[in-house]
Amino acid sequence: MRRGAIAVACLWFWPVTALADGANDTRIKDIVSVQGARGNHLFGYGLVIGLNGTGDSLRSAPFTQQSFQSMLDRMGVNIRTMNARTRNIAAVMVMGELPAFATPGGRMDVTVASMGDATSLSGGSLLLTALQGADGQIYAVAQGPVAVSGFQAGGRNETVSQGTPTAGRIPNGALVERASPAQLEQSGVVVIELRNPDYDTAVQVAEAINAMGRVRFSRPIAQELDNRRIAIKVPPRMPISRLIAEIGNERVRPDVPARVVIDERTGTIIVGKDVQIMPVAVSHGSLNIRVSETPLVSQPAPFSQGRTVTDTESQVEVSQQGDSMGIVSGASLQALVAGLNQMGLKPTGIIAVLQAIKSAGALQAELVVQ
């Protein structure tokens, strides 16, 4: 977790404790990436076989039937005049990421996801599938048994499922056939990029590298370019990989911007350490309206000419709670948490209050709502 950040999940703020000096120092390799050293997304279309009656129905998924017939045609088996009814095969998309600097013979993980009406890929095996990049070139081939974490079971009237049984993974299931196009620049300058751009952090990284350069090479070798990039001049007769390894072990203390992140779906709130609130009065109340319907039945007397009539009786109850007003202000995270907790707010109430405080201009931080 970033320096000074706390998590509020589901119900309460967790207490904040003071961190020892130096506890937040982070290795440079953990907060930067080397420009040009990146992976490449691959994808392909394939077939999963060996399913126990949980595959695609060939009538509802014609692309599965066409792929099945084409595969058998290449093996010298002609079934185009027959009406195949197997449900042990499923059409899938195969996805993976080619690692940077991958060479032929390397391995990579792949993800398999169903395209048709298959109910589960559990127990299936992926047939040889070519994986191509955005340029249309084939960089890897995938094959192997599919590991599925979800399941689905049930009878005629009820079904129980957990996870997603129509998607799975094949660890090390793809074999690299073509080298990755990502290569390091050999121009004598290496550029590293911060994963979380910040001017202060960029300056700290450059100063840490220069301190190492004065000891190791008797001169500074780094210069920050902006809030994301730091340029490093490669000393003569110094391999780039060794230089990056030495730089990565240097430690800095990244600066964390004042930010509040809210996930309204799960009720999660992340509050940064430097978040401040100007003095503001807050009144948060909840209006509860409850409507209940009671069925009424009017039954006629025996042997009468009347008929049974049904009706409903409605009852409406209105209640309002939490209509007190409190003062919330704080130059520190502890003061903010204490003020909100004293008001007895739940996560949904805290989210509404923080959004209203931001609209009032009293929240001195960036508010991110997901």
Image (cartoon, rainbow, N blue to C red):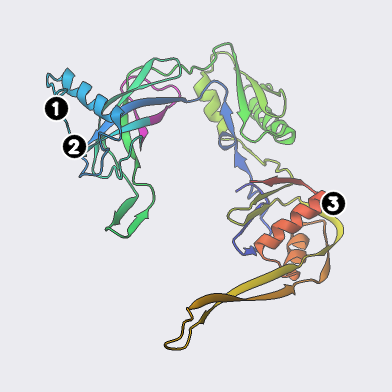
* Figure check: 170 above or below 301: above
Task: Give the magenta-colored segment's residue range.
Answer: 95-113
Which element is circle 2 on?
loop
Which label sits on residue 86?
Answer: 2
Q: Position of residue 139 (x, y in %)?
A: 37, 19
Residue plotted at (60% across, 36% down):
31
| For residue 120, side relative to residue 253 (left or right) | left
Q: Is residue 333 left or right of residue 95?
A: right
**Closer to viewer: mark 3 or mark 1:** 1
Pinpoint residue 235: horizontal percent, then vertical percent. Answer: 60, 16
Which of the 4 image quadrants contains residue 28? top right
- Left or right placement of residue 225 versus residue 301 in this view: right
Image depth: mark 3 or mark 2 in front:
2
Per the image, the residue denoted by label 1 is 82
Residue assigned mark 3: 360
In the current view of this chain or complex, which residue is farthest to the top? 187
Q: Quick check: can you spot residue 42?
A: yes
Q: Residue shown at 47%/88% (left/top)?
A: 301
